[in-house]
Image: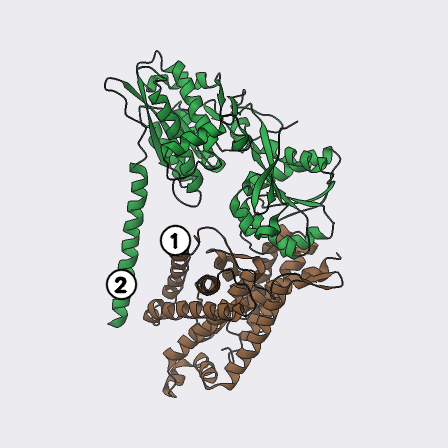
Amino acid sequence: MNDIPQQLVNGLTNGSLYALIAVGYTVVYGIVQLINFAHGEVFMIGAFGALSTWFLLFRDNTSVWVLPVMIAGAIAASVATAVIMERIAYRPLRHAPRLAPLITAIGISVFLQEFVRLFYGTIPGFPSAKSKIPFPAIDGVTGSPFHLGSVVIQRPALFTMGALLVCGLFLGWFINKTKQGRAMQAVSQDPDTARLMGIDVDRIIVIAFALGAALAAIAGVAQGLQNNNIDFKMGFMAGLKAFTAAVLGGIGNIQGAVVGGLTLGVAEALATVFVTGAWKDVFAFGLLILVLVFRPQGLLGARVVDRA
Amino acid sequence: MRLRSVTTVAASVLATSLVLSACGSRGDNSNSNSGSGGGSGEKTATIGVIAPLSGDLSALGLGIKNSVDLAIKQANQNKMIPGWTLKLDAKDDEAKPDTGANAATALAGEADVVGVVGTLNSSVAQNVQPILSTAKIAQVSPANTNPALTKGAAFATAPKRTYPGYFRTCTTDDVQGPFAAQYLLEKGIKNVATIHDKKTYGQGLVDAFTKEFTAKGGKVVAATTINPDDANYQTAITAVKGAGPQAVYYGGEFPQAGPLSNQMKSAGLAVPLMGGDGIFDPKYISLAGGAKANGDLSTSVGAPIEELAKGKEFQDAYKAAGYAEPPGAYGAYSYDAAQAIIEALKTSLASAQDAQSARQATIDALGKVSLDGVSGNVAFDEYGDSKTRTLTVYTVKSGAWAPEKTGEVK
């Protein structure tokens, strides 16, 4: 029982990670009503992008100034993947029945996983991605943890929570204060009218994909730092949990994604305390079913007015 | 138009890569028939290999194949079985039970096959056993450690031999756990936390460890599990940390154990992690963070190859044969498995008209084999398990596994 404060910290850390990924599901859903099941893979490719940047430019250098460059590399890889994915796989299906893009998303997810698994190791100088690859331990954000009474707060955990805070503030500013952000809100409310008002809907959709991908990339780096390793499968479970978080908070609602992610993380951690670790996924998905039965619109609701 | 050309390129790239990979796997099979070269007029008997020759575990699988190939070549050179030439037929099981079953069916259909060395994975063996058994083909595994394969599902309480044609040259999981327990108690470690991955192998190890450890006066202060699909184990670590264990015994494999050890130490639980042969791999150390893993322990079957009387001889012969891949963790056991089959064939083929009619006689002869192999004395008990129960505790010292203590289970 005296584990509770520590487990809350663990839960908030995992929850922050889920939230960062969940935003990508929710932004895209809010605009094109598409569940992009390949978003977990965008997260995975972000982590590989960061690792590749490190291998190419820094190899063996773990100074803290390397981190921003790695994050930039991660974002570049994720955003490129998401934009190409939208262009090749989703745009041609924009007016197809709903089921078609959904199945396509699952196909892309499998394709990207296998592509990384088989292709990554063939690049000269890169390790094989067929099993887990150790992630560099960057100074400053990894290393000796902080102690708060009996609670241990690890540096990567602070990085993850800090990243969620910064990204959340940035998103709030972007959606509400910039022209592009307001155009996103308009498209999510009524794409046809938005188009009549002179908004380039295709462009806004690309921005939505890119925005979600950038956050997923940061989450990828955070996970790499936290778990000390990455692999081609990491996007699958993380994507599923983040999707759960998005639905939990109310899909299409950005604040909802953040609240949903944190709730899910804490629920899992508390399940470990009160029941046993083996049951934590049962609790996570059980919570999803309960919310869907009693509050199908999610905790905060898919508020139509500002659901971008 | 532009979009279409992008898709066309992508599609053709995909198609090309599929064709290339198909060629690759076919190439693997075609060069697996070696070890021939006998004079004309001689009869042929084939020893099959079923192991993962492609995929994640191919390093181990190819080591198995090469070691068997070496044993067969030596037997042919020395004319160990007069009038007969031995051949190798290696099949890829991709570490998958259903592919393994197909490989076994293919081998069972070949009239010349008298024995099979394999498999690597216990889960694959479960599917291979019934097929080879029906065809009365002897099977000797160099690597299956699941006790149920020889002694049946109730191996601890009511052991019963399931397949009379199945033997193995390695030791089983039910002795690894107790060996680890005895080692920790010897080192004065009395309070241990256990974690496993809920899989047959991991849970079996932890159960056997706990039984022995508590019986000999140790205390399991916390027990929990992890989900093998997870990558972050903080919740499990927090759950055991409060109990103040002096060591953590982990049942599972290195892809989870490495990160677990790393995250344990990051979270301030700086005690050694100990596991079974599933974590005895260099990759464990890199995942556990190199120097952070110093002091972690594992048990593995047999004695370190350098310390064995015939170990050097085997390694030299293997090197001289010029195989592309190293023998791996199970090379010596595979070589011994092949040697055991060859020894049995000396008896069974002596008066046989053809290979197929000698199958049952080969199984009977295998049970009586006793030879001085690379891994020690090769002989089988009434269940088909190796009589040699040597185990070694390894510890991580400056970035590599170093043998710590070799012994027999008491």
**Of B117 and B311, which appears nearest the observer?**
B311
Q: Quadrant of residue A300?
A: bottom right
| Chain assignment, label 2 | B
Quadrant for residue B116, please give it. Answer: top left
Q: Residue at x 55, y 75 (%)?
A: A167
Q: Amino acid at mark 1?
A: Leu
Q: In the rendering, at what x and y percent does residue A106 appear?
A: 41, 60
Q: What's the distance in space between the residues labelled 1 and 2, CA to CA?
A: 19 Å
Secondary structure at badge 1 equals: helix
Q: Residue at 26%, 68% (x, y): give it.
A: B4
Q: Is residue A175 above or below residue A280?
A: below
Instruction: Residue under label 1, please give it.
Output: A118
Viewer-proximal residue, B94 or A130? A130
| Tint of chain B | green
- Residue A219, position as x, y percentages in the image: 53, 66
Residue A70: x, y in percent?
Answer: 49, 67
Q: Is residue A264 toward the left or the right of residue B116 in the image?
A: right
Residue A266 makes an appearance in the image: no
Query: What residue is drawn where x is 28% and y is 65%?
Result: B7
> What residue is shown with label 2?
B9
Percent coordinates x, y for residue A8 in the rendering: 68, 63
Residue B205 appears in view: yes
Residue A34 lies, with reference to residue B194, above or below; the image says: below
Give the crowd class for mark 2: few <14, some 14-19, many >=20 residues within 10 Å: few
Letter of the chain in brown: A
Name the colour scheme. Answer: by chain
Quarter assignment of residue B52: top left
Q: Which mark is residue B103?
A: none
Q: Secondary structure at mark 2?
A: helix
In the image, taking residue B344 as reference, residue B249 lies left or right, namely right
